[in-house]
Amino acid sequence: MHPKKEQWGIPVIAGRKKMYPDLDYSSLEKMIEDQKKRKEGISHYYSYWWTNEERPRVQKISAYSPVQIGDSFWVVSAVIDYDDLYEPIAEGFLKMVCIFVGILLAAGIAVVLFGRVMRDMRRAVREINDLKELNEQLEKMHRSEQSIAHQQRLQIMGTMTGGIAHEFNNFLTPIMGYAELLMMELPEGSEEQDSAKEIYEASEKAKDVVRQISSLSRKNVETVYKNISIKKFMTRAERMMESVCTPLIHMESEFRVDDEMILGNATQLNQVLLNVCVNAVHAIGKNQGNIRISCHSEEKEKLAQGVIEKLSDVWKKYIHIQVKDNGCGMDKETLRQIFDPFFTTKKGGEGTGLGLALAEQIITSHKGYIYAESKKGEGSTFHIYLPVLDTEHMPQIVQNIPRKDYRIVVADDNAKVLQLLKKNFEKIGIQIQTCMKREELQKCLEQQEADVLVVDETMEDCSGVDFCMSLAGRYPDMLKLIIIDGVSREVAEARQKGIIDGYVEKPVSDTAILEAIRNCASQPV
């Protein structure tokens, strides 16, 4: 039923065609035909606003259902404007699209902001890492500067003590020499001879003091170098290390060495192992623990692949000594400082902090290496490397030195020392020639070849070892001795390689020189 009364009673198609013949009724006719089929349905069709004078064409939706009344039927239809149905749906869809676009936009903004935050975080992390690396480098530089300053102070101290020892030895040489002459010339048991003997004995004590002062010199850190059997040395060292262990500590050992030899000072190397063992005992404390000491030889190429960066080309093999404990261990900061002088983790008065510093100095002076590995709560392992002596370079004994009428040349920059030596040698019937300058010595050797050359370790700022090396080719049969303040590594290696045949420690005397000749020659003097 049409909502307007004036439309009531007008046939849907025929009546309106008469009233409005120019309009299109095809869609409306199709909808009427569908309703006549006596089926329920919904039709979408085009119609007009009949009450509007302009007759605008509109879309409508009709839901209809047939109702049987007797032999005929009525069609019950509900009509709704298409826009009234789909406009809310379209508006809802548009809102959903807007909401979805808003969500996408918000997500995009969030992603961009998150990306910026992550970029800023990465930049901050890089800056922190760069600053940390820069700080580590600055700390490393600071430690290097401190180490260099410390080494310079030690070098200055070593130079000073070495110079003092050298001068004192020069003073002691004539004192001891003339005291010995007086003892020989004065009557036996006389008061004068007793006085000369006291002078000589006091000089001997002064000589010991000078030797102790000389030991502070970096040039003369060691006393005497000898060929050491590493197997025998480690066996003795093990017994020494066992003596410092508590009853709760069990010591194990494994020595996989044969006849390898090293050049060094056994007393100082014992001191190194003792210091390392004492540190292991302190790390274990009052608990039960184990200390394991092992030893084997390693090729230089294997060491080069490890933590040691620069190796000497002189040595082919090294002895590797390990001392391992299961004590409290050390953190990285402590491990970094253990070889620093005066660094200690012990309570005040219980440690000097010099044990491992001295151990490193001794191993370095033996042309070796020492380092440690440790983890907190797991224990520590000390690694010591010492060069193996090449048996092909063992010292050669000079043969066939004539007993009589041989020529001795002594070179020293101290006139009093030369005067005393010449006087003492003449008393026993041996003629010697003395020189104070290097040019004078070279001219003397060119004029007449000497059987024995005795030269000071330092003469006019020239190394006596270097001078002897320069003579090796020209005077192969000449016996070469060095006058030294204390045995240095340079002198020990020079003797090992046959550059020199022996050395005489200051204060020097005629008897000391003759004793050195006896030790080098095959025939007694």
Image (cartoon, rainbow, N blue to C red):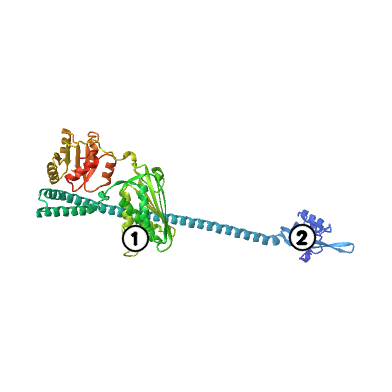
Is residue 126 visible in the rendered image? The answer is yes
Give 71 or 166, whichever is nearer the viewer.
Answer: 166
**Left or right side of 160 for 92:** right
**Residue 366, position as x, y percentages in the image:** 31, 48
Is residue 142 visible in the rendered image? The answer is no
Q: Quadrant of residue 131?
A: bottom left
Q: Is residue 373 above or below residue 409?
A: below
| Residue found farthest to the right | 71
Q: Amino acid at mark 2?
A: Ser
Crowding at mark 1 (Cα within 10 Å: few <14, some 14-19, many 20+): some
**Left or right side of 162 for 102:** right
Q: Amino acid at mark 1?
A: Thr
* Residue under pointer 2: 62
**Residue 352, position as x, y percentages in the image:** 31, 60
Distance Cα–Cα, label 1 vs label 2: 102 Å
Give 175 or 464, whichever is nearer the viewer.
Answer: 175
**Left or right side of 484 for 59:** right
Q: Is residue 268 above or below residue 470?
A: below
* Residue under pointer 1: 344
Name the image quarter holding the N terminus.
Answer: bottom right
Q: Nearer the viewer, mark 1 or mark 2?
A: 1
**Residue 295, position as x, y percentages in the image:** 40, 49
Q: Is residue 501 above or below residue 369?
A: above
Numbered label attached to residue 68 = none
1 or 2: tag closer to the N-terminus? 2
